Every structure is written in C-alpha cells, then in structure tokens.
Amino acid sequence: MHNLSLAAVAAAALTAGTLLGVPGKAAADTPESVAQDIAAFQGYFKERFPEVALEEYNDGVNVLPQYAERRENWVLLMEFPPYEEHVEKGREEWSTPFANGKTFDDCAKDWPPANVYPVYVAESDDLRTIVGDINACLEANGEEPLKNVNNGKMARLVIAYKERFNGEPVNVDVSHPGAVKWYEKGKEFYWTKRGQLNFSCADCHVHSAGQSVRGDVLSAGLGHTTGFPVYRTKWALGGKPLGTIHRRYGGCNRQVRASSFSSQGPEYKALELYEAVMNTGIPLKVPSQRQ
C-alpha cells in the first residue's frame, strides 16, 4: 500500500485536477446540470475502482481495494457489531413516551423517508434534516431539545429512525430552484480549499481516495453519507463512539486546521445536501462502522 504525506495528497489533487474540477462561478446550476454532476462524480469512481459496485460504497473505506488487507478483520467484527448496544438503547429512547404520553413515532408518521433527506422547504428556504426534525418533535411535545447534536442520544435517535429505511437508495429532490441554490453552496464547500493545509473535501476523498496517509486509508467521497451516524473506532477510544455526519464535518475541518462551523448550521447542511445528491442510488446502511 502506497503511503502519502499530507503534502503528497495536495499534489495528487493537482494531478487529478481538472477531471471533476472546482465549480465555476459564472453559470448557475440547474436540475439538468446537477444530473450531469452526479454522472461525472459517480463515473470517476467507477473508472478508478472498477471492481467496486455502486451499491457497495455504503460500506465506506472497507470496500476499497487498498483496504483489502484489513477487510477480513472488518468482516469478522461485523459478526458482532460494536454498535449493537447503542442501537438497542436508541430504539428504547425512541419509543419512550414523553410527559404528554406521545412518542417520536407520533411525529415521524408525517416525516419523509430517511433516504430523501435533507429536504428543501420552500416556505422557509431552508433544509430539513433528521436531527432538526427530532429536536422539533421534542419542542412540539413540551420536551427540551437536545443541545448535543453530534453524538450520544441524538446519534442514537437518528439511527433509530434511519435504520428502518436501510436498503432504500438515496434520492434527494433538488428540482426546486431554491434547492439548487443550497446544492450550489454545498458543492462550493466540497471543492473549496481551506485551512492552513489548504485542503478541500475533494482533495482527500476524490483525488486521493484509497491512498494512505499516516496509516489510515482515505475513504471515497462516494457513499460517504449513507452510513451515518457511524460507530467510529477513533471516537470509541475517546468514549464517544457514535457520531452524526456533522460531527465528522467538524473533525475534517479541524484536521486541515480550518475554523469549524456550527453543526446544523447552513454550511454543513448545504454540504450534507451536496454529498447526499452525489450518493443518488446508493442504499442506506445505518449505522455503519468506520476506522
């Protein structure tokens, strides 16, 4: 396995450079151009890793050929997944009645299926996330919303909702002009370099996917959001093994020595939308285990 320095990651990005490119500022996206983006993004990975089927990307780095020497250990680990006790606890928390006797299911009966989130709401020009809907449900039933939206109980509750849609392919609707604008913001975030290391999301997870940095294999951007919340080995060592996708975004920003943004803020919601759109057609697999 080839190991890259952080500087080499940036060089690899420049080499791969213009295949997918940084989004231009001149022309606005349209639903048609979004479809072209999906085809280009997924086509890039199909060409780079031809042995990996589209639906397999929901297993993250574990499916990449560069991770083959570790895959057997992962397969054995999945016989008794380390996240099972957390999943069970989340199911119990989901079904525990509020003070008024209702449960999350009373709210969720009116929610969209998990595979179509984030959902654009034209009336507020905002994006609905499952995290946001869970807190809105708590408030609507006279309960305190959860302040920690990155791990712990929130992550467990998101799993409790999303797991019932496992196997459903991601299919986010960006046909509304307002949704396209949110998509543009997420697309720009994904491809823009930031921080002291001057890295973009794409530098690591597109151009250098499958390469090894400091002993870790860089995962592919394709399929990235389909397994979250995840049980991450690195997080488990710190006593907080579960994390939402926005927790991961914050960690990535800090790793490139950039200022982080607020979880559930517009920057990360837009990024979540962009990644979900790129994952069109890949089935949900929640929770998942990551390195």
Image (tube, rainbow, N blue to C red):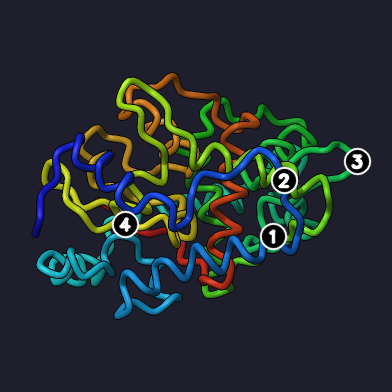
Give amino acid for label 3. Glu
Which three-letter amino acid code belongs to the residue tagged 1?
Answer: Ser
- Horizontally, residue 192 falls left or right of residue 196, namely right
Between residue 157 and residue 291, name the one nearer to us.
Answer: 291
Quarter of the figure with residue 265: top right
Q: Position of residue 247 (x, y in %)?
A: 44, 36
**Viewer-nearest of labels 4 and 1?**
1
**Up-down relation of residue 109 to residue 261 (above or below):** below
Upstream in sequence: badge 3 or badge 2: 2
Asked if the residue at tag 2 contacts the one at tag 1, i.e. Cβ–Cβ closer than 8 Å, the answer is yes
Instruction: Give the class, few, some or many, for how many residues have Cα within 10 Å of label 3's Cα (few <14, many ≥20).
Output: few
The kind of secondary structure element at disc 2 is loop
In this rendering, the answer to whether 198 lies above or below 127 is above
Q: Name the front one of labels 1 and 2.
A: 2
Q: Secondary structure at mark 3?
A: loop
Q: Which mark is residue 27?
A: 2
Closer to viewer: mark 4 or mark 3: 3
Q: CA distance from mark 3 to mark 2?
A: 25 Å
Residue type, label 2: Ala
In the displayed structure, 273 sits above or below 154; it is below
Q: Nearer the viewer, mark 4 or mark 2?
A: 2
- Disc number for residue 123: 3
Q: Mark 1 sits on what residue?
A: 33
Mark 4 or mark 3, earlier in chain: 3
For label 1, the SS is helix
Q: Position of residue 264 (x, y in %)?
A: 60, 33
